[in-house]
Amino acid sequence: MGANSTAMELGSVQQDSGRSVAVVVSASMEEPPGSAALVPRRDSESTESKSAHPHRAGWLTMLINRFRGRRGLVASKTRVIPISPSRTTPLIQPETGKPYVSNAVTTARYTIWDFLPKQLYAQFSKIANVYFLFVASLQMVPSWSPTGQYTTLVPLLVFLSIAIAHEGYDDYRRHRQDNVENNQQTNVFRRYRNATNSISSQDRPQPHRPISPHSFDTSSTPVAELSITIPLTPTMHSPTPTLPVFQKIKWKDVTVGDILRVDQNDWVPADLVLLHSAGSEGGCYVETAALDGETNLKQRQALKATNDIIRTPEDIISFSGCAHTEQPNQDLYNFEGYMEIGREKNPLSINQILLRGTILRNTPCIYGVVVFSGEDTKIRQNGSKNVRTKAPSMQRLINKVIIVIFSLVIFLSALCTVLSAVWNNRNNKPGLQAWYLTARGVMRSDTASVLFGYIVLFNTMIPISLYVTMELVKLLQAYFIHHDIEMYDPVTDTPAEARTTVINEELGQVSYLFSDKTGTLTENIMIFRKFCVAGFSFNHDLDPESINAAKLSHENQTTHTSEGHDHRMDSTPEGEAATRLRRNKCKSKAGKVVGKLRRSSQRRHGNRSNTGYQSLDGKGILEMESGDNSEPFPESVHVGKHSYLETIVPCTPTSDLVPFLQTGVRHHMTERIRFFLLAMALCHDAVPELVDESDPLNLKYQAASPDENALVAGAKELGYIFTERGRGGIQVQSLTTSPSEVPKNEFYEVLNVLEFSSKRKRMSVIYRMPDRRICMFTKGADSIILERVRDPKTGYDDFSAMDSPVSPHGYDGMDPLESLEYSKSTKSHRHTADRSSASGADAGVGHGDMNRRERQHTLDYVKEDGVDQPLVEDDMGAYFFGQTPGGAQSEIWEYHQTMDHIQEYATTGLRTLLYGHRFLSEEEYKEWSKQYADAQSALEGRQEKLEQVADLLEQNLDMTGATAIEDKLQVGVPEAIDKLRRAGIRLWMLTGDKRETAINIGYSCRLIKNYSSTIILDVPTQAQAHKELNNAIKDVSKGKSQHVVVVIDGATLSVVEQSPELMDLFVDLGIRADSVICCRVSPAQKAIVVKTVRARCKHAVTLAIGDGANDIAMIQEANVGIGITGKEGLQAARSSDYSIAQFRFLERLLFVHGRWSYVRVSKFVLGTFYKCATFYLTQGLFQLFTGFSGTSLYEQWTLSFYNTLFSSLPVMVVGMFEQDLMASTLLLVPELYTFGQRDCGFSLATYGTWMAAAVYQAIATSMIPLWIAGAVAKFGVEPGDETLFSMGLGVYTAIVLVVTFKIAYLETHNWSIVTHITSFLTLVSWFSYNTFYSFFYPIPTAGYHVRGVFQTLAGHLSFWLTIIVSFMIAIIPNLMAKMIKSQMFPSDVDIYQELEKDPKAVQRWQEWEEELGNQGAEAEGVTGSKIQRRLSIAASIVSRNSSRQAPSVLSSRQGRSKSRHLRDGTIKSDQASSMRRRSHEVAERDRFGEGQDRVGDLFAEGVHRRGTSEQQRRSLSGHRFNQSYNNNAMSGAPRSATQPSFPRSAPFAMPETNVSPVNMLGLRRASSTGNPVDHHLARARDL
Amino acid sequence: MSSETKSRKPARKMRTQRPPTAWDIDADEKRNDDGDNWAVLLLTKIFTSQRPVAELVIDYTNCDKAGPTFVRIPENSYSVNFPNSDSNGEPPEYKAIWGVGSANNITWPTTKCTVKINLPVKLIKPVFVYYRLTNFYQNHRRYVKSLDAKQLSGVARDASELKGGSCDPLATVLENGVLYPIYPCGLIANSIFNDTFSLFLNPLESTTNNNKSYILTDTGISWKSDMRKYGSPGYTNLSAIRPPPNWKKFPNGYSEDSPPMDLSKDEHFQVWMRTAGLPNFRKLYSKNEQDDLQSGTYTIDIDMNYNVTSYGGTKSIVISTVSFIGGRNPFLGIAYVVVGVLCVVLGLLFTARHLYKPRRLGDHTYLSWNQNAAASNAATAHPATSATATGASVRY
């Protein structure tokens, strides 16, 4: 490739003055003003090009040939992009021989040329349209049509053009959007030479891009701005002939090989290889939200080689290199290639790639060379190629039905034609001839005319207006969705929006839900929640306000501290009073917490007493002492709205801790905590950003991951403020150690950063501390850090037996939590023994000794500030931290405590990280850094080597502490997921996040239950994958587990997706499992997963929900795509079908609107088919009396108006307003949702029943009047008139009555005023139409004698009697059938419809709602008005009903759960069996308790009683987190008895035997009052 | 009969406590009961209302075979119904004599049929005489539109206009290479009923009606609206048009001597053109709205021209009175009886069922997921295999 890249031409120079001048020239691209000053320089590698402008084509072929010659070498595995700024022709893609694809991107589906053909194709792929076209053409033949000639064609054309115009408008909008994107501007590198050297004006330079000639029309390219930077320094050596400039061009004109400059906050226009970044050390930050949905910044790093060479534009001129890259693909997370500079090959990885769709942040500007453009870019590769036009699955069924009807029409026509022929024969025999039908004795035989006549006659059995009226109906449904106040998010001011109306009913049939995580389930806000140092857990819950409050109260507190201390020691009456007062406070304020804790086991209290609660005492007193004038801490700190963990693990809030640390109290714990906080402030590679210039501490951090951000921010909130990242180090302002101290900034020199990678799962930073010592801080996943923690004998042994919640070793078939619990309980046994042998609180000293030195080491450092003072621990510290005299605790206790805490954090869905540190000696570090430098300069396998070297150092760490970060769930997500599960919807979470994160979120949003079996698929090869999948499927099929969750990551998925067979297996497994979590998946993979599931379960409706651009592919792939109109912009929402503001609205969208839409559309479609069938079958029946000649019973206009005027209203009202069940019922009983999944609303079977009704009613409505009119009688009767028209009139009237009644009253549940009005209107319009007709019908007509008929008939009673009796005969059997069905074989809907009318049930319901309201008002984010509304609905029902008895369902349920237990009893190990049983219990509770139990509660009195008390207890906790915890962990009271959930190991517990009388008293008191705080207070006093 | 009081009986307590506005089984039951009562009420009315209608239908298709003396009409060829009378009178008889039909100075052989009827009671005015045809498909698709509305309304349509129009194949005649339009064209006009009934009923005995003939009129038998459809022939050159081939009155076509009839005045034609919707139909021939028809024996003369046997049909003469709900219509009554019985039976069945084995409303055991759960518990062997796309309910 040398020829391309090295053909640099150095010509004469335009010498400029030695200063930089920026010239901005306005110029059209066509004719750059360069003709005066500057002209684009065209020089290229081949001299021919210069002269051979007109012969470019020939030149191109040559070039193509040249490339072709090399094709073998290129082998299309890599793409070779010579970086040569002098090139003027576009690069040629060797595979195609054409230039690389344009960077213009089209999301539009049609061009102006293919729009019509494609649309016609699309329209006529609707089978009904083909049918109508067929009928319309038949009808055009006058002698064939018994009806009008254009009655089909005209409406068909109208409806088609509406549909096409609509589609056209949509596409036009897409085109406009594309244009906006394609016409954005970017800066491309160009060389210009001085005009003095310029070529003649005839030979004026052509812009060098032939591929998009249109853009060079003067019209289309108005003015281009040239912003030219004239080099600052004159080039010293040889003067350059050219002027390097960055010229603004449109995105669509960018081609592969162009060198671009991207400025801060600009979008990257194509996939670039980063050449140079103006950021530090060639780094830059990009925001990739549009690609993977993660809003955090990602760091990209220019190659050192290029970054150093290219610094200014003129460097680019002299730069020559060649990028060898992979071919375009979808992988967002990997990139392979190398940059050839001279002889040197520099590896390129994803770190050097800026993808289109990312935004440059925090970096002034970068230079990059385009490697993939347009459709080749990864974002486009990830987009779905052919956006399929979504059609509801009901459409398929409708098509089927249409085929059925069509066959019926053909069959009927054929039958009638045959019969007509038979009749003709019979009546054309010599001697038995219907002479009146013949002209001169010859009977015409016209089979074709009869056949087609019949087809035309029956054609409207498929109503032509079906699609249009359906569109109308769905439009209204969409309107309801849009205007549902309960799906309106007041915070973001967004209502739900239906962007398409086509697939409303799909919302009611969803079986699979594919959800994005970030921004959809979570709010994408990471909050530092908890940390654990030395076995003590601290709860961090500081809003900025409460921090300020803490600061304010700080002085007050400190002055009183010692006093408080005294009080406590002396146990003065005041102290007593204070305690009492505090207790009362606890009762009132923390009442909710207490209520919950009461149910916890005593054992737990015992444990806790030594850790968390103690501090409550201290705090209580501190607070008391701080004076009554101000309440230093807002209440929310204690029972605050975010502190749900408090209720589980009472632990010190940091709002207490920080002030305490600042008091100068000396305690080894304070030092440990300080050091840990320092570690948090140090161990990261975030960048601070000053938000407010005036306040140097008002910082915002930009970090590679949001957790890191949360951690640094957390450190800041806790007083260790990372203020600046400078050259070589960072500044941290630390927390003062005493009240008088002024906070000071310290500089920590960064020696090395060992970066995070998904493989390493940890990062380390080596610092030279201000005291010149070297310390390495490491943070990472707990499993990883634990392996590296010093002294594994004491610590790691235990942990190795214990599964972390995430097993890293592939599929192990075990329930991680179960095994966890098992190991834990054994462990705690052991420790209990330990403790008792080591006699109480002094246990573990032996262990402690050996660790002492190390810790002392740490502490020595930490107290450096207070130089000479040895660490004298004062009582205050002991008081604050409880019974933790330094050194008295064993390190092993610390480990276990820490692990327990971590476990606890993880199970509640918090993300945990462990921090470790290690002090390095000078020599140690030197030696290591040498190795590290070697590894860094390694060419081959650099990454591995670096990792190895890093691993050398990251050993033997001290455990600094653990952190827990909450990935904040969106409001109501767990509840919504629960309900979705109950509704039979399988949830698949597809996220770009890490596996650990995903699983954590899985726990917190109850996708994974505590009793779930988690199957983790992590396999590198297909063979293994095959085995694992088969195993897993086998296991799942056995049904051993109650709840199975499959976890797979993107890498494994890409292995799996390579083989269709494996993919099938995987989807099979996924379908059998209850939930599936796919992590680290790319947008394309998301789409593939959705697609495969969709293909695998053809009849299941899939729904994808997401908020980011990375979800678009998935959203478009799924049957229903839902966009969250969140903070990440509207891309997803825009390409979605429906958009909602919050995940929880999905509940209402699916259960209520989806269900209703489904029911409505079903009934609408059925009703439409039914009404047409009934009507046209009468025509068929009438043929019995016409010699099968095909005479229409009805006058042709009356006939045509049937569908529009006389039958459409009721059916449309059903389609618009039907509610088979009330919204509140549907929300309460998600199980009802299976109605749609099972196609109960509309299937061939239901269609069959409707058709049966249609056939019967057609017979009844036509035969009865005709029979009465004497059709079969020998002697006949005398109706008022016996012409064709009056026959038809009677039948028609009967049909209108029957159809209206059946649709509006028999099949509609929700009889609203609209129903009555429309039914009435239909009848009125029918009769007034006839009245009008009878007076104004034109006189000279054949066949139908209309004039005056109706008024005559209306005067005959027999006319009315006939209609009434035929109506009754038609409708009564239908009525009966419905009665029998609902009486003897009631469906779920029938039962709930009955229940909705049961006042007692409604009353219980009301109570339940009330409880739900108390308990979950915040949880659901529902407002009081909502509850109020539901209540009023309920009340309105009550008022309408008197009392009725309701049955109980309890017995059957109990029976079931019993049998389950029996089955479970076979498990061998006692332990395991009890575990399992417990899990089953929970599962049962969860399933029936949350599911049928509720239902039972509602309607069965006995059950309800229990439910109520429990609900009431539950309702004590007002907060949503409480709620979420409740429903999750304590959904059973059974659980609390044995409490396996968070087994705090017992070592520190006071074994009952050792409890002193006072303690006993305390315990007793605790148990008697049920208030654990009392207990601790008592203990505190005793001490 | 109040269903309100009835439904408050304890046995039906449950049913009445339902809101009336929603679909509900019991409301329907109630409705049915109402239906019963209402139907019964109506039935009696209809039955009683049937009584005043006297009707006499005599199939004279085979009259020509009767011979010159009166013979009894076969049982299955007539039907008589006289209200307020125990007897149906003597059975009708008919006889046929050969004669000639004549019109426009032309004669042709015909059969004169004389029907003798005996009326045991007086028929209350108005009295209508109909002819009734069976198995005649006036509603045949080819037949029903076979007319030219413009020509009928008096517009002179020439052959080229009619050719290929709705009158085909009876629009034109080709004579000597010249196309002549048929007036009136089309199958309907061609097949007009051309039997003639005498416009009076002759008393056979002197006692009958004081030996006074009962005069009938054939004016005013057509619908007013129909009259307006027809006009006098617009053709001035009568030799340029041809009568329909079946019209016996014009064996030599139209001429000044035998001009085409004025359609606007020919009410029989108008009645005929008002095509019937069913193959069995009756059309009004004549009527008397002034006088009651006194009891006694009458004869009526019929010129038999119309060929019904060739297509297997029959022709009858009908003499009838009307009641307030129209003509005599036994079928309506039958329909109501059927409906009434149906309602009663079903109502009884449901009541029985309810008493025997009532289903508690809102019984949870009927819920599909409860039943599924029970089912899947019974068959735990393959719980997961059934977990298909139908949702989790299958498994639980």
Image: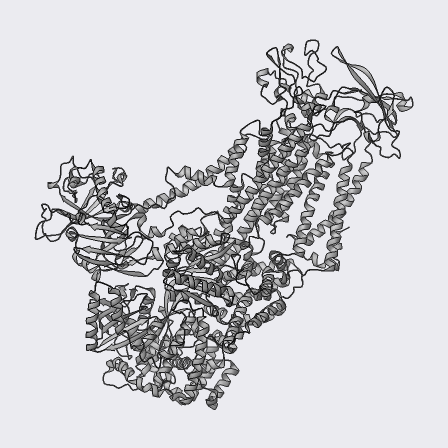
**Left or right of residue A957, residue A1449 in this image:** right
Residue at far top of view: B256
* Outermost residue toward the right in this view: B207
- State whether residue A37 appears in this view: yes
- On the rendered structure, is A514 left or right of A1198? left
- Viewer-side residue, A781 vs A1069: A1069
Q: Position of residue A641 (x, y in %)?
A: 43, 69
Q: How is the image coloured?
A: one colour
The tally of labels here is 0
Quarter of the rendering containing residue A779: bottom left
Q: Measured from the top left, where is residue A1168 in percent x and y? A: 58, 43
The residue closer to the viewer here, A728 or B6, is: A728
Compared with A1300, A604 (above or below) is below
Residue at image point 67% right, 52% down = A1379
Vertical order, B87 against A379 (above or below) = above
Q: Is residue B55 among the parts visible in the rendering?
A: no
Where residue A179 sits in the image (x, y, percent)? 32, 44
Judged left or right of residue A1393, residue A277 is: left
Quadrant of the drawing holding the C terminus of chain A: bottom left
Q: In which quarter of the view is residue B128 placed?
A: top right
Nearer the observer, A683 or A447: A447
Q: Looking at the image, which is closer to me, B136 or A265?
A: B136
Q: Position of residue B388 (x, y in %)?
A: 52, 58
